[in-house]
Amino acid sequence: MRLLSTGSGTMARSPVHHPLFARYYARFSVSAETRMGMAGVRERLLAGLSGRVIEIGAGNGLNFSHYPGTVAEVVAIEPEPLLRKLALESALRAEMPVDVVPGAAEALPVKSEAFDAAVLSLVLCSVRDVSRALGEVRRVLKPGAQVRFFEHGLGGGQAMRLTQRTLDRTLWPALTGGCHLARQPVAALREAGFTLGPQRQVLMPEHGPTLPSSYCTLGVAWRPDQPAAH
């Protein structure tokens, strides 16, 4: 549940600042590496990547140690100041160059068609404008480049889906830095013009209670070789 959006879409005017949730997320995410099986998920998410990679919503940088040696450089976007500070510390321990920079998913501060792959890891739940964010991802990728994604969203039976939607309309986004439970990331990728590849459903935690945030999808998509039709 990453914190990417700005109210205006411009970091200078409206920086993301969720200090309480950022502190909680930083602690929770570290324990989730082993207790919830997130370390294994990160390995599967990033396996086989190469070239220049942009990671949208790097959080505290827990992905950095899982990138394979074939990756030449990671540009990691993270707007929340505390999480970005922790990501910078993680970047210093990474085995490849990692450049951690502020930025919003809806207005990525990088050139078009500059990356061989993009990584979306528990971030689409919290962006302000999913369509705009994915349009930016498409813009910065080279034709045919990959998107690796691990996202949670709408899932379970009727009662669970009602619970997810009710929480989204009430306290959940305010308590979790803008996270939403009932979004449909795979459908959003398709609507943004990406070609979907293999994907698998993952429950998080893998063992334990099923939570409204448990319904995750791990998969890959591609930016088409041709530009989007207008």
Image (cartoon, helix red, strand yellow):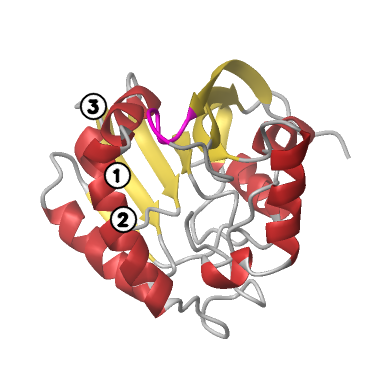
Q: Are marks 2 and 3 in contact (CB under 8 Å)?
A: no
- Asked whether residue 204 is drawn in magenta, I would say yes
Q: Residues within 10 Å of mark 1 (few under 14, many from 20)?
A: some
Task: Please report whichever mark, 2 or 3, sits nearer to the chain's N-terminal start.
Answer: 2
Q: Are marks 2 and 1 in contact (CB under 8 Å)?
A: yes
The image's mark for residue 170 is none
Q: Residue at x 42, y 70 (%)?
A: 21
Image quarter of residue 171: bottom right
**Residue on which the image places disc 1:** 32
Residue 192 shows in this picture: no
Residue 214 pos. (x, y %): 52, 38
Q: Is mark 3 on a helix, strand or loop?
A: loop
**Residue on which the image places disc 2:** 28
**Residue on which the image places disc 3:** 68
Q: Residues within 10 Å of mark 2 (few under 14, many from 20)?
A: few
Q: What's the CA distance linking mark 3 and mark 1?
A: 21 Å
Q: Is mark 2 on a helix, strand or loop?
A: helix
Magenta region: which residues?
A: 203-208
Residue 131 shown left or right of residue 213 in the figure: right
The three-letter code of the residue at mark 2 reads: Phe
The three-letter code of the residue at mark 3 reads: Pro
Task: Please report whichever mark, 3 or 1, sits nearer to the chain's N-terminal start.
Answer: 1
Q: What element carries label 1?
A: helix
